[in-house]
Image: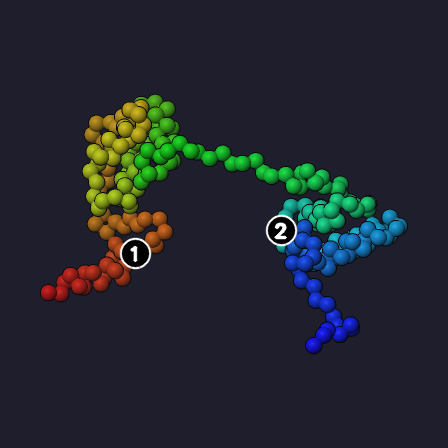
Amino acid sequence: MEASENSIKLYYNTEVEKLQMPEYGRNVLKMVEQLKDIPDKAKRTEQAYAVVKVMESLNPQVHQQENFAQKLWDHLFIIAGYDLDVDAPFPKPEPEVVNSKPDPIPLNTKPIRARHYGRNIESILDLIASEPEGEVKTAMIRSLAIYMRQQYLIWNKDTVADETIFQDIERLSGGRVRVPEGIELSKISADANFNRPGMNLNFGGKGGKFNRNFRGKKGKK
């Protein structure tokens, strides 16, 4: 059956021009295009204010941004392809500035010497190495050792000797940090729970479901 001459032709978004600001929809684009056809600049400016009000109602999230009124006018010019002659309350944005890409974030590509401790450990060791000898530096070394032991237990074994942690401190610092004689770390509780990141499971706590079930099964013979 042939289509009638009076039948309505359907248009799809894939067949029309891509929207520069999709959040405002194609109807706002049509409004902006009609603005350009208004010959009188004063009337064109008046209608531009009305279009901005429509854009504000369609995109209320813009109120969360600083200087949101200027943002709306910037969006109006972007939709118009920067080709809109009106007396706007803000200067017209420059395409070079709007389309410019942010500076790339420099990444630290230096390999991590001990992944189970993380990259920040090396920075902390640099800080401790710059400290003068004394009680403060000893306290910093002890606190760092306790933290490193916790990280070690997350990724490796169930137990670790204090001497292993001390050796890692001196090795990772390149010998710049020496662990003082007689330093001791606090004892680890039998109920201590060291889960890997992302594993929010209560395996070791007294009230943990796994702990209760395990003890219950272990007690049955």
Which x, y percent locates residue 26?
70, 58
Q: Can residue 201 be seen from the camera position used here?
A: yes
Residue at image position (88%, 50%) is 39
Which x, y percent locates residue 5?
78, 72
Quadrant location of the N terminus in the rendered image: bottom right
Quadrant of residue 88 within the rendered picture: top right
Which x, y percent locates residue 38?
86, 53
Between residues 154 and 96, which one lies in front from this camera angle?
Answer: 96
Quadrant location of the C terminus in the rendered image: bottom left
Q: Is residue 32 left or right of residue 162?
A: right
Categorize mark 1 by other alpha carbons within 10 Å: few (<14), some (14-19), many (20+). Answer: some
Residue 137 drawn above or below residue 15: above
Residue contact at pointers 1 and 2, CB within 8 angstroms: no
Which x, y percent locates residue 178?
27, 26
Q: Earlier in the sequence, mark 1 or mark 2?
A: 2
* Residue type marked 2: Gln
Name the residue tied to disc 2: 64
Residue at image position (75%, 74%) is 4
